[in-house]
């Protein structure tokens, strides 16, 4: 591939990235949830795969959730090294929406 084309493609890639980062935090929280959390918790939070908690019944505060997602649990992986603090906060906020929609 010639270099000018490569640079053009990279430019498009970064431009798209910027558009995404301007999403409202709830949209990106949902996106992060779909990417990293549905595997165990399911789209509605109730899947409970691998002994995961039903997130719609969770009584954790926002701070507790952020800590839990960052550090993980006995079976749940820690996301502190996987996604950014902002992403963890966004997905923790999204869990409130998930509760309300159930
Ligand atoms: C590999 C499976 C797995 C994935 C992926 C996963 N979890 Fe969990 N999650 C668990 C399990 C299992 C528990 C039960 C607690 C434990 O592991 O100690 C749990 C518990 C929780 C709790 C605590 C609920 C409560 O009140 O006890 C929250 C909040 C949570 N997960 C959020 C998330 C979020 C947000 C993501 C995505 C960033 C995620 N989880 C991804 C398995 C998973």
Image (cartoon, helix red, strand yellow):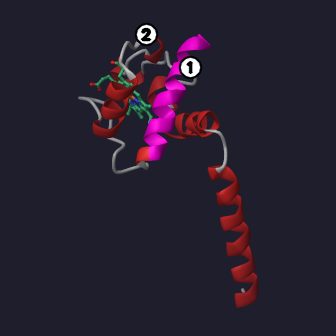
Q: Which residue is mark 1?
A: 98
Rendered-image quadrant of the N terminus: bottom right
Determine the residue located farthest toward the left in the rendered image: 74
- Residue 5 image position (x, y, % from top left): 76, 83
For image coordinates 44% across by 40% down, the residue present is 88
Is residue 96 or residue 6 the one in the foreground?
A: 96
Res. 2 visible in picture: no
The Cα–Cα distance between marks 1 and 2, rounded to whole angstroms, is 10 Å
Magenta region, main secondary structure: helix
Q: Which residues are magenta?
A: 86-102
Name the image quarter holding residue 26: top right
Residue 2 lies in the magenta stretch? no
Is 91 a magenta residue? yes
The residue at the point 41 percent across, 46 percent down is 85
Q: Position of residue 95 (x, y in %)?
A: 50, 24
Q: Residue at x 54, y 28 (%)?
A: 94
Residue in the foreground of this view, choosing between 40 and 28: 28
Q: Quadrant of the C terminus?
A: top right
The yes-or-no answer for disc 2 within 8 Å of ligand 1 is yes
Q: Is residue 29 left or right of residue 22?
A: left
Mark 1 element type: helix
Q: Assign a secondary structure to mark 2.
A: helix
Q: Splitting the image into four quadrants, where does ligand 1 fall? A: top left
Q: Residues within 10 Å of mark 2 (few under 14, many from 20)?
A: few
Q: Is residue 84 visible?
A: yes
Q: Position of residue 81 (x, y in %)?
A: 34, 51
Q: Mark 2 — residue?
A: 57
């Amino acid at each position: 591939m010639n270099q000018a084309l490569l640079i053009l493609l990279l430019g498009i890639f970064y431009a798209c990235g910027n558009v995404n980062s301007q999403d409202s935090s709830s949209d990106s929280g949902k996106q992060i949830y779909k990417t990293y959390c549905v595997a165990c918790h399911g789209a509605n939070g109730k899947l409970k795969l691998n002994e995961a908690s039903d997130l719609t019944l969770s009584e954790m505060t926002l701070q507790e959730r952020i800590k839990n997602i960052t550090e993980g649990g006995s079976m749940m992986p820690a996301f502190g090294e996987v996604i950014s603090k902002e992403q963890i906060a966004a997905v923790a906020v999204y869990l409130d929406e998930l509760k309300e929609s159930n």
